[in-house]
Amino acid sequence: MNIQLFDKSNEKYVKEAANLLAVCFPQAYSDCAFKEMNDILDEDRITVMAVENNHLIGFVGAIPQYGVTGWELHPLVVNEAYRNKGIGSQLVYTLEEEVAKRGGIVMYLGTDDEFGKTTLFGTDLFDDLFEKIKIIKNIENHPYEFYQKIGYQIVGVIPDANGIGKPDIWMAKRLGGKNNV
């Protein structure tokens, strides 16, 4: 397997990425995956891909925010057949290196709970929010634990972002250590 910056000129990889995006996130991209890929591959953004046997098996992107100091990780997609093999971690680590080279000091992301995969789902998060974040539990393989394992922490929640009781969990990681804070 090879992890590298996304080859934007390779139409085959772009098509495979769009198809993968639509399969992994049908609720969001089933009818607009190619348009989303155009955005993901914009020249201001960074995108890293994983390729095996000349087929794209995953990718991750970052959007510059706050000038170049803060970057939003969006999206991370890995073919289901290749999950739990360290590919997602490798993609994110490579992306973090690229972001740091461009002056990034923090990477953040939102990881929605639209389908009841954490204990934050279905609750009134305007009531005792910080206690609920403190005792969050993963009910059904929600990705927030993956991000925690690679150094991200929950820094906030947007209650009802995806509808009543369907929050967006915000996570962040400082790139390059503590750096004299």
Image (tube, rainbow, N blue to C red):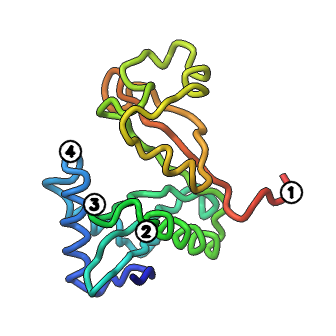
Classed neighbour count for the residue bearing mark 1: other residues with Cα under 10 Å, few (<14), some (14–19), many (≥20): few
The residue at which mark 3 appears reads as 80
Residue lying furthest top:
127
Secondary structure, mark 1, is loop
The picture places residue 16, in percent across and down from the top left corner, at: 21, 73
Horizontally, residue 36 falls left or right of residue 118, namely: left
Q: Position of residue 144 (x, y in %)?
A: 48, 44
Q: Report the amino acid beneath label 3.
A: Glu
* Dot 3: element: helix
Amino acid type, residue under disc 2 in the picture: Ile
Instruction: Kindly identify which residue carries mark 4.
Output: 27
Name the residue beneath numbered marker 1. 180
Mark identifier at residue 87: 2
Q: Is residue 94 above or below residue 152?
A: below
* Real-space Cα separation, disc 4 to disc 2, in angstroms: 23 Å
- Which of the two marks, 1 or 2, is nearer to us in this view? 2
Q: Tell me which numbered mark, 3 or 1, is placed earlier along the sequence.
A: 3
Q: Position of residue 178 (x, y in %)?
A: 79, 56
Mark nearer the N terminus (4 vs 1) = 4
Sequence-wise first label, 4 or 2? 4
